[in-house]
Amino acid sequence: MSAAATPPPEDLFGYAIPGPPPAGYRSHGRLEHVLRTGRFAVTAELNPPDSADPWEVYERAAVLSEVVDAINATDASGANVHMSSVGICALLTRDDLAPVLQVSCRDRNRIAIQGDVLGAAAMGVANVLCLSGDSVGVGDQPEAKPVFDFDCMSALETLRMMRDEAKFLSGRKLTEAPKIFLGAAINPFVPPYDFRPRRLAKKIAAGADFVQSNYCFDIDILREYMKRVVDMGLHETCFILIGVGPLASPKAGRWIRANVPGVHIPDAVIERLEAAEKPKNESKKMTVEFIQQIREIEGIHGVHVMAYRQEEMVADIVIESGALDGRKKAQIGIAGLRAQQERRMESIRKRRAAAEAQAKPSTKVD
Amino acid sequence: MYAVRKWSVTHARGLNRFYTLFEKAVVGFAPLFRAIGYDRLERPVAAVEHGEKSLLIDCQMCGQCALSSTGMSCPMNCPKSIRNGPCGGVRPNGMCEVKPEMRCVWVEAWRGAGTMGEAPIMEVQPAIDQSLKGRSSWLKVAREKSAAGEAE
């Protein structure tokens, strides 16, 4: 990967490099900086609340923020309605956290997508992940109209045009281009396997600077895929992050395998959980092992941790895996992290109480 | 028709050759089309095109045919109308995530590409122009290619 000229700072800054993006950078974001300075990046998914309460977002982010370089704000994943990605990004940037805006082509046409990305960039969002999106049929509202005006590739091409040429798809000029690090999704674990590396090549051609994969539970398939990717030299033009995550139980594993599109879980994984006394702990241990094995594979630049409704596990997994080596955060250990998380939670609770106290008198006045 | 659609992918190379020759003929007729008027021709030609392509590939009349880059498997039959597939939801047996009874359009495209060579399927297809839906792709090619030929 083309390494940056700037030397890595001792510790990581907040969510953004102060000032404009350094030479050779697409964005001012922390994720891009970590990747370009050759460190192993860690991102995680924030499960969006079914709520209009901002504190639910902050509390979930607090658990993740100490151990990740960026937080993915999912966009109605699985076609289930939750708080929007743009909304979550707005909250996270207010709290100096680094979100990845997820843009699914299922719910919005090109007019909405281009506008949302401009707005997100204006709020300080530095990373945008383009997805085609799960079909409405798998979600909680299958009666909805699927949009699919763009697909992930045309979304990438359009956002790259906005960034690099400072214009909309129509050719109309932007007075300020969005400085965004562009991402896409990969799934090496579903057919047609031999086309998957080529599809990554197409996504890179369309503008992907980084990719995040779906859940990896099968290292053998990943190794095959990465061998091909490295042969094609794709790891030199795009940062590759592999998705991992714990399963709550063997039953959850079976359910996900049967009902969530694109998640491949080999029998061996489920059998191992079934044989374990404490399946949840075993699953955590297995995720740590996966991260360690993934790091050994040539061409991989980071991991993306997805812990559905188990965010509190992410910090343990990341620290135990050693993925943050060389960073101060990793040296303080789990206890230190817990303390930091607790301080953050305490500050969130205080701010929440203050906000609520302020809100009360005004309702009395009315 | 699903069976015929699969036959078309199996014979992607031959079909592509036929379409390449056919396209040349269509472009050759461009002066005649212009004399009659493209607008006047739009409806009858689109109807014929729809009939022929419906039979062979379950054409959805997107008006901007990409078949030669998609192994003769029409991407508009993808329930997500992904023109640069396949998505990450393909089932382990190669069937569609949304319609389990249908083989993934892009698994089929990759099969068709196997007979046609890899280069065309590696082209990134641009965003679809929704305003062309229902219009004739043949007339569009005739109009554009003959204009490009004259410009040279």
Image (tube, rainbow, N blue to C red):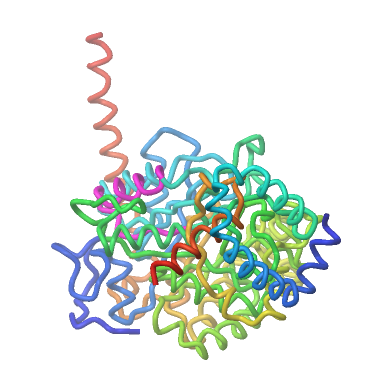
Of residues A14 and B71, the one nearer the viewer is: B71
Residue at the image point whose x is 68% and y is 59% from the top: A249
Of residues A233 and B6, the one nearer the viewer is: B6
Horizontal side of B60 relative to A12 (left or right) equals right
Horizontal side of B5 relative to A280 (left or right) equals right
Q: Where does the image place residue A302, in percent across and percent down from the top left?
A: 43, 75
Q: Quadrant of residue A206?
A: bottom left
Residue at the image point whose x is 33% and y is 75% from the top: A35
**Seen from this angle, which residue lies furthest right?**
B3
Residue at the image point whose x is 50% and y is 53% from the top: A150
Q: Where does the image place residue B121, in percent across and percent down from the top left?
A: 59, 73
**Seen from this angle, which residue lies furthest left?**
A19
Q: Where does the image place residue A203, in percent across and percent down from the top left?
A: 48, 70
Q: Quadrant of residue A337?
A: bottom left
Is A241 rendered above or below residue A225?
above
**Seen from this angle, which residue lies furthest bottom?**
A231
Q: Quadrant of residue A227?
A: bottom right
Residue at the image point whose x is 65% and y is 62% from the top: A262
Q: Quadrant of the N terminus of chain A?
A: bottom left
A129 in the magenta segment:
yes
A302 in the magenta segment:
no
Is A294 rendered above or below residue A136?
below
Of residues A93 and A290, the one nearer the viewer is: A93
Q: Is residue A282 visible?
A: no
Is B119 rendered above or below residue A252?
below
Q: How many marks?
A: 0
Q: Is residue A231 visible?
A: yes
Secondary structure mostly taken by the magenta-highlighted segment of the chain: helix
Q: Quadrant of the C terminus of chain A?
A: top left
Q: Where does the image place residue A105, in percent across and percent down from the top left?
A: 51, 50
Bounds of the magenta span? A111-130
